[in-house]
């Protein structure tokens, strides 16, 4: 049986997007007869670890500081594929790994930065903007663009389903990713009911959110706000919402693919680049995280009250992503 060894991470510093992408990939691999081995950071929050439906091992602190253990494990398992999906892998670390692991193991690196000479066999870069696709003298095979986003296979069905853009906004979904380190959720649940006086508001909390109890308590005072956690129907909720207010990670990708207009609060520095790429391409209203205020939020909400703005944004989002990225990535792995 072919084996894929996946190295990823999730914590308050890098959020949960990399982990969620790898879970989607691993489920697809298992469904296609592959054996999957996961290696994650040991400081991952326990709530997130419980969401991993596979056996996994843990590396200490930083994978780059524990590379000898990685090389020992890979050399022992000798997988067909070693897949890295980390916040930002260094050229030096990747060069050492490529040199010391078995020749039969193909190294795949998921990267969103470019402009580096990464010593991998395959580089997958899902960024929309081609500016980030430059890898200099790297001899890796490149697969770039939003067509390689790690989105759940089920999203393609919703992508093909007609997205109804209503004249007025009646339902709003607020979700700030797996961690929400700046606690934007509390700010939004205070301001959004006033911005949209008739809308029903659903809030979905991530597994790593440290403010859950406070958010649940505040929601008890509002008849229009409902708070959820650990849901299994996120894609459907995105589809039925008239507007989503989200972070700049995977949920933004999903909203674009489904065609749900979005106001974006990037919660991590790397999310700013992603969100701006989408905005420059015609999808999403990105908030300036250095200037978050009641006035700036109201300005964003007022722009979304315009039906034509939301309709154009919805149509453009569907043009940017078709939801078939995981199938394309499976095709890459099958051909190894």
Image: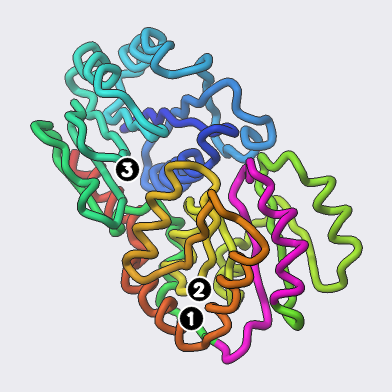
Q: Tell me the tag on residue 310.
A: 1
x, y percentage for residue 102? 22, 16
- Label 1, residues with CA under 10 Å away: few <14, some 14-19, many ≥20: many
Image height check: is 197 above or below 143?
below
Q: CA distance from mark 2 to mark 1?
A: 6 Å
The answer to whether residue 318 is magenta is no
The answer to whether residue 183 is magenta is yes
**Residue 63 located left or right of residue 134:** right
Q: Which residue is mark 2?
A: 261
SS at badge 2: loop
**Residue 316 located left or right of residue 62:** left
Tell whether label 1 touches label 2 (CB within 8 Å).
yes
**Nearest to the observer: residue 122 or residue 53:** 122
Instruction: Tell me the magenta residue range.
Output: 166-195
Q: Earlier in the sequence, mark 3 or mark 1?
A: 3
- Label 2, residues with CA under 10 Å away: few <14, some 14-19, many ≥20: many
Residue at (14, 40) in percent of width and height? 141
Q: Which residue is mark 3?
A: 112
Q: CA distance from mark 2 to mark 3?
A: 24 Å
Q: CA distance from mark 3 to mark 1?
A: 28 Å
- State the image quarter where residue 89 is shown: top left
SS at badge 3: loop
Q: Quadrant of the N terminus?
A: top left
Q: Tell me the tag on residue 2.
A: none
x, y percentage for residue 51? 62, 40
Image height check: is 35 above or below 211?
above
| Residue lying at the far right of the rendered structure | 221
Residue at (45, 74) in percent of width and height? 259
Total labels drawn? 3
């Amino acid at each position: 049986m072919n084996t894929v060894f996946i190295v990823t991470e999730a914590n308050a510093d890098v959020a949960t997007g990399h982990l969620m992408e790898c879970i989607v990939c691993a489920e697809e691999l298992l469904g296609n007869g592959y054996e999957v081995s996961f290696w994650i950071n040991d400081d991952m929050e326990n709530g997130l670890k419980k969401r991993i439906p596979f056996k996994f091992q843990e590396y200490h602190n930083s994978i780059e500081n524990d590379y000898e253990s990685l090389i020992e494990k890979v050399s022992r398992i000798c997988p067909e594929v070693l897949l890295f999906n980390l916040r930002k892998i260094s050229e030096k670390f990747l060069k050492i790994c490529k040199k010391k692991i078995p020749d039969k193991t193909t190294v795949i690196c998921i990267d969103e930065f470019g402009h580096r000479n990464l010593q991998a066999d395959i580089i997958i870069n899902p960024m929309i903007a081609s500016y980030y696709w430059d890898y200099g003298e790297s001899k890796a095979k490149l697969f770039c663009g939003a067509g390689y986003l790690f989105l759940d296979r089920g999203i393609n069905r919703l992508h093909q389903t007609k997205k109804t853009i209503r004249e007025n906004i009646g339902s709003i979904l607020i979700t700030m990713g797996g961690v929400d380190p700046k606690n934007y959720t509390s700010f939004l649940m205070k301001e959004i009911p006033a911005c949209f006086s008739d809308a029903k508001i659903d809030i979905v909390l991530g597994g790593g959110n440290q403010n859950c109890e406070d958010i649940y308590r505040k929601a008890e005072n509002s008849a229009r706000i409902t708070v959820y956690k650990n849901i299994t129907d996120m894609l459907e909720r995105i589809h039925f919402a008239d507007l989503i207010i989200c972070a700049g990670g995977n949920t933004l990708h999903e909203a674009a693919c489904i065609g749900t207009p979005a106001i974006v609060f990037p919660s991590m520095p790397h999310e700013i680049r992603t969100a701006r790429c989408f905005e420059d391409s015609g999808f999403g209203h990105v908030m300036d995280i250095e200037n978050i205020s009641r006035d700036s939020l109201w300005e964003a909400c007022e722009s979304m009250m315009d039906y034509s703005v939301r309709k154009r944004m919805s149509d453009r989002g569907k043009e940017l992503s078709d939801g078939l990225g995981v199938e394309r990535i499976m095709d890459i792995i099958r051909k190894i």
